[in-house]
């Protein structure tokens, strides 16, 4: 496939390129992005390629368009962002993922400007666009740049109460639990303590579910400080999130979590949480 990609790019047969890319795997799509970028030193031409590919019906072509956009942003930031916003709300989930990846790359390279953009997108009517903000924040967190920790936490903070399933599946478990808590454990834990004082059940759900992700076991003793408090919440939506976090923590740190749950079994205020968690341990 790579030879075919090289050939059609050299011939500038972009309609044929779109046909070749359909059904291609991620490595081939990335290769197409790289080769298109190498084919010209004029960013306006590269943007034209992105616009053309973004208009195609094949999702793979639109994924390649996403990959080109970070490369053309310096020459036409307005045009790049307009197209990226469109792709962030694409009907195809693979394109939306590629748009989120492109946003993350732009955030890492142009942090102050992209933070302004993402604050606007945070208020967008489309949950897909709001989710793109979460993906970008998670990808930027991987740099471990300490000066970015608090701005990224503040960026996602207004979305904690967003009840849309698209946001809910990603915010607590992924953006916080697998990214921010992993790369900025101290600062993120401080924010989780602050957020745990909220009365909004969606905020509390996100706080609890943050400890169900990959970074949770490393902070299990600190996590219990918050989870003990949230386990007293009488709302089923909240305490079931606590139970989920506890059984996932318990699988990694049974020597710490099992004795805690045993104590909860003797506490009438927490017994339902303990029973729910122990079903899976």
Image (spheres, rainbow, N blue to C red):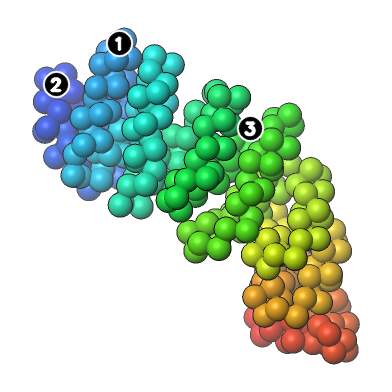
The residue wearing badge 3 is 143
The answer to whether residue 50 is visible is yes
Apparent side of residue 196 relative to residue 155 in the rendered image (left or right): right
- Expressed as whole percent of the image width and height from the top left, the position of residue 232 reads 81, 77
Q: Residue, x 67% and y 48% (percent of image)?
A: 157
* Of residues 250 and 192, the one drawn nearer to the viewer in this rendering: 192
* Of residues 194 and 22, the one drawn nearer to the viewer in this rendering: 194
Provide the secondary structure element on which disc 3 rests.
loop
The residue wearing badge 1 is 42
Q: Earlier in the sequence, mark 1 or mark 2?
A: 2
Crowding near the residue tagged with mark 3, few <14, some 14–19, many ≥20 C-alpha atoms within 10 Å: few
Q: Residue, x 11% and y 20% (percent of image)?
A: 11
The residue wearing badge 2 is 12
The CA distance from mark 1 to mark 2 is 15 Å
Apparent side of residue 9 relative to residue 189 in the rendered image (left or right): left
- Expressed as whole percent of the image width and height from the top left, the position of residue 105 reads 50, 31
Provide the secondary structure element on which disc 1 rests.
loop
- Expressed as whole percent of the image width and height from the top left, the position of residue 141 reads 63, 38
């Amino acid at each position: 496939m790579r030879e075919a990609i090289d050939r059609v790019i050299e011939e500038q047969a972009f309609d044929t390129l779109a046909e070749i890319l359909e059904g291609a795997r991620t490595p081939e799509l990335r290769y197409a992005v790289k080769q298109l970028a190498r084919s010209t030193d004029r960013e306006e031409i590269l943007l034209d390629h992105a616009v053309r590919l973004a208009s195609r019906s094949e999702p793979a072509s639109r994924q390649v368009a996403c990959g080109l956009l970070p490369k053309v942003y310096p020459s036409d930031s307005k045009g790049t962002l307009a197209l990226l916003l469109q792709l962030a709300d694409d009907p195809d989930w693979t394109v939306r993922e590629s748009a989120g990846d492109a946003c993350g790359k732009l955030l890492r390279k142009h942090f102050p400007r992209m933070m302004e953009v993402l604050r606007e997108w945070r208020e967008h009517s489309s949950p897909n666009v709001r989710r793109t903000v979460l993906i970008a924040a998670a990808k930027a967190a991987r740099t471990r740049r300490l000066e970015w920790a608090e701005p990224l936490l503040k960026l996602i903070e207004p979305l904690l109460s967003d009840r849309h399933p698209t946001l809910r599946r990603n915010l607590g478990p992924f953006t916080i639990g697998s990214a921010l808590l992993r790369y900025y454990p101290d600062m993120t834990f401080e924010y989780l303590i602050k957020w745990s004082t909220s009365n909004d059940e969606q905020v509390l759900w996100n706080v609890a579910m943050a400890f169900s992700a990959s970074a949770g076991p490393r902070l299990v003793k600190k996590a219990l400080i918050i989870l003990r408090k949230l386990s007293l919440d009488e709302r089923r939506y909240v305490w079931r999130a606590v139970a989920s976090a506890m059984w996932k923590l318990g699988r990694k740190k049974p020597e710490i979590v099992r004795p805690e749950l045993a104590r909860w079994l003797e506490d009438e205020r927490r017994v339902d949480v303990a029973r729910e968690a122990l079903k899976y341990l």
